[in-house]
Amino acid sequence: MSDFDGKYKIEAKTGDVLAISFVGFKTQNITVGAQKTVNVVLNPETAELKEIVVIGYGSQKKAMVTNAVSQVSGESLVKTNTTNALQALQGQAAGLQITSTSGQPGESLNVVIRGVGSTAGSNPLYVVDGVLTGDISYLNNADIESISVLKDAASAAIYGSQASNGVVLVTTKKGKRGAPGQITFDQYYGVQSVARKVDLLDAKEYATILNEAAVNSGKNPYFTNDQIAALGSGTNWMEKMLTENAATKNFAFGASGGSETSVYSTSLSYLGQEGVVGGKDLSNYQRYNFRFNSEHKLYKDVVTLGENISFAHVDKNGIGVGNQYNNSLRSAFQATPLLPMYDANGNYFDTTKSTEPWLTGVSNPYAMMVYNNQNESDSQKLLGNVYLQIEPIKNLTFKTTLGLDYNVNEGHSYSPIYSLSIYANNAFDRVNQNMNKSRSINWDNLLTYKFNAGENHHFEALAGSSYITYNVTSIEAD
């Protein structure tokens, strides 16, 4: 470090190299010779302005972008160690508001870009490697090169009315030309626990309150002091409903490389997350990903052929989320600690068989969660495209792209015969099975011409067409 006047003192031998650097300036390397004094003037580092920003149907230098566009690098996303890319975007892009719909593993997120612009919803349009899709939660953070958020009407206008809520552009990782083969492995493991739990009454405190309520109603107390002293702490239903150290784990293996004519990038990954409410037996999310991108230059770089393919398989089971008036945790708040979890036979306690007045109509909240929320689903998503680009003359390019977004989701729920109270019982087994398939195909044709008039004047013209078709099939049976 230099002092306030820029002076410094270093002991160095002839032939040593001084590396002099400062934030925002270019580093200079100076070989030590016979001189006693080395004065250096650093030049400003402006290389960041050459950074490429992905915009609608193309890319531009960062210095040329005047629209409201935010870009987040894949390295920043990976550092957050979140289960999906949208969670990783929280707090990293101005004007982007992301909130959770619930704490259930694998649940969707609400995304709002600069406020709600339509009564039909607030979700933006997602575009992954040029393919339009409705969600990016299936992506592994380690597969993403960058995310651009188009926030104003001017930058998103090229996508039409479907971009009224903004556009999120995702670019997955590609190989680099002439780079040696590279293998990467990304892994993390974490645990989740509830930091602060609601302090509920134990059995003694609850029995005391019951006695006070009975006396205030002109009745005799339910318990004697000796009976209250012998009750112990009873059942803490919040402890029963919540799990400590629910695990989250991620493994991502990648390989990339390239020559002067061909590049490739591929990856395999796995992500698993256990639910805090109900534990891994009732709430669990697992995702498997495969990705392959490649590009090949043919006929002296006149023709370029490539593809981007990603596949995700998701297994999910979880409890019912409900709402503020009807959910699993609300019933745990209301349940009495005088209610035991199991009866003498090891079955969930049924209060219809009890003669205690304080247990009339009371249901075991954990058993209710188990019986009524046995929901499982598995889904597959295939998203990708193939493209052909031709440059017949310098700066004039024609690119045609065929993209596919194919989704299959199967789900089923089961509720067995049970009896927990006069209000919570089921006389018949109930099963629900459903399946949904959706397919969208988009075909884009773009003609681009770039023209430079000197060093300070750059022109780019783009003309194109886009054809999109949707097909949805669903079936459900009870």
Image (cartoon, rainbow, N blue to C red):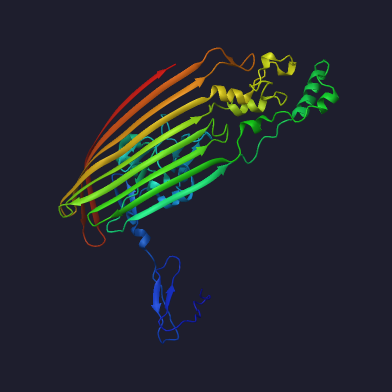
Q: Position of residue 103 (x, y in %)?
A: 54, 35
In the image, is 12 to the left or to the right of 421? left
**Side of 392 where 363 appears, left or right:** right
**Residue at the image point whose x is 37% and y is 36% from the top:** 164
Front residue of this view, candidates 15 and 112: 15
Write the residue at 43% across / 43% down: 85
Judge from the rendering whether residue 134 lies leftward or rightward of residue 200; answer left or right. left
Residue 263, placed above or below residue 41: above
- Answer left or right for 197 relative to 468: right
Q: In this view, does 347 lie above or below 50?
A: above
* Of the pair 27 and 461, the residue shown nearer to us: 27
Q: Where is residue 468 in the image (x, y as percent from the top left)?
A: 27, 33
Q: Which of 153 and 288 is in front in this view?
A: 288
User: Visible in this render: residue 122?
Assistant: no
The quadrant of the image that shows the C terminus is top left
The residue furthest front is 345
Q: Which residue is drawn at 55% across and 16% down?
A: 417
Residue 338: image x %, image y %?
Answer: 73, 24
x then y, percent, for residue 405: 32, 34
Q: Is residue 241 visible?
A: yes
